[in-house]
Image: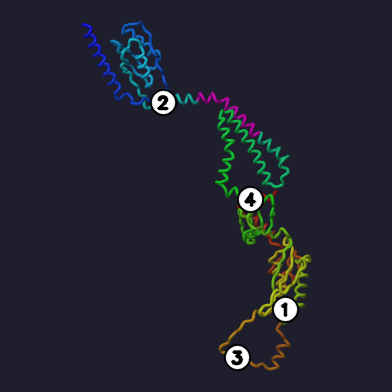
Amino acid sequence: MNTVSRMLVFLLAMGVCSLVCVAQEKTPEQPTEPPPAESLPAPKAVNVTPEVADSEISTRLTRILKATEWFEAPRVEVQDGVAFLSGTTDDEKYRQWAGDLSRNTQDVVAVVNRIEITQPDLFDLSASYGTVKSILRKSVQSIPIILAALLVLLFTFLAMFIAGHIADFTLLRRFQNKLLRGVVRKGLLLLVFLLGIYLVLQIAGLTRLAATVLGGTGLFGLIVGIAFRDIAENFLASILISMQNPFRYGDLIEVEGIQGFVQRVNTRGTLLMSLDGNHIQIPNAIIYKSKILNFTSNPKVRLDFMVGVGYDVPLNEAQSLAKEILESHPAVLDDPEPTVLVESLGSSTVNLRLYYWIDGHQYSVLKVNSSMMRLVKTKFEEQGFSMPDDAREVIFPQGVPVTMVSAEETEVTTAAPAQKTVRKPARVAGDVQDEETVTEAEGSLASEYNELERQSQQARDPEEDSTDLLSS
């Protein structure tokens, strides 16, 4: 065979090898896009003896593939410089590495890579075992860091405890208000806690997270303040109320038309007991913004009522008598002294307005006013002072029948007026008022607060778990 024939045979062999390689690469077993894996660079060249035999190349490449332990039953056959690779492996990157190794080998002109990729079994958990083993390894390596972080956290709680007690005996002793003391104390403890968390994150190597925690505290507070605006508003209002003390426990106040005795002030609202015995809770923000009418901050309470007498009644005598009644009443204070003033001239009466003061802590406003109006009416009737009603025009369309009475019958009627039996009121046990001052129907003139307080103790507390800010 001449040189030209040899060249034709060699070119034909090369064409066949190229077709086989293309067919091998297009088989459905090979993935079109290999999964990402770490790069395994093949050596640039494998030195063998120049112009070595194909068998020596096969032996050399086979030994290399076996030495890597990446392949199962690796085998390399070389014919006329064409390397045929066979065997199995579990990763595409190993298959590519074997092909690159063969191409870089001396005197290898082409490579036919027939190495197959083995698919793992359906219940193969080797990858999971590897992941678990890696996690366990990292966990064991992290034990010293975890112990150090726990130790710092323990010292943080100990420092919070010590700082709280030191603040109680130094700084917080200057604050008389219970709520304000609690807010300042929690603020100090929060600063110590944030410092401890910062050190823990530093030990764990989370420096950026530690800076984020400290830098994001203000932003977090802003977000929480916006989300819980009403709650924060009531909380701040409770602090201001406890600092200013516009009322105390047991005071009778009126806010937004709601009247009641103060029972408790917590961080959310103020609890009142109305004169009807009902619990009413008003948010502290409304309490702080609204007008507060405190009836018991000044124990002296001024009462007044109006009485009308006829135009035929001497006003001086009526005023003097009314003032005597006011001054003789045991519940009326001498200072300020009571007054009786002419208020208006009505259609049929002259209207007198009686002003007097009582001790609101000791006496009931309603009962004293009732007793006073009853006494004035009785004394005016005894003195013969007329108290007519408003004049009205009455029309009788069919006329009014008139009966004539003889003079003898008139004398008998005038001489023997009808005697009305008046039942004297029973004296209330333990009361200082006389029988004329208070009746059995009115009862004692004492304030209703004691009775309402007793009812409050018997009733279910709607805020059992809350803290009373007025108890400090």
Q: How far from the left and from the top, in percent, is residue 247?
A: 69, 55
Q: Which residue is mark 1?
A: 381
**Residue drawn at x 66%, y 36% as measured from the top left:** 160
Q: Looking at the picture, which amino acid does disc 3 mark?
A: Pro
Question: Element type at marker 3?
Answer: loop
Read off the residue under disc 2: 125
Dominant SS of magenta comes to: helix
Upstream in sequence: badge 2 or badge 1: 2
Q: Could you tell me how far apart the alpha carbons at marks 3 and 4 are, in whole angstroms?
A: 74 Å
Is 218 above or below relative to 6? below
Tag 3 residue = 401
Q: Are marks 4 and 1 in contact (CB under 8 Å)?
A: no
Q: Amino acid at mark 1?
A: Glu
- Viewer-closest of 209 and 317: 209
Q: Which residue is mark 4?
A: 237
In contact (CB < 8 Å): disc 1 and disc 3: no
- In the image, which residues are magenta? 136-158
Residues at badges 2 and 1 in contact (C-beta under 8 Å)?
Answer: no
Disc 4/disc 1 C-alpha distance (Å): 55 Å
Q: Of 281 and 209, which appears nearest the observer?
A: 209
Q: Is residue 156 covered in magenta?
A: yes
Q: What secondary structure is marked by label 2?
A: loop
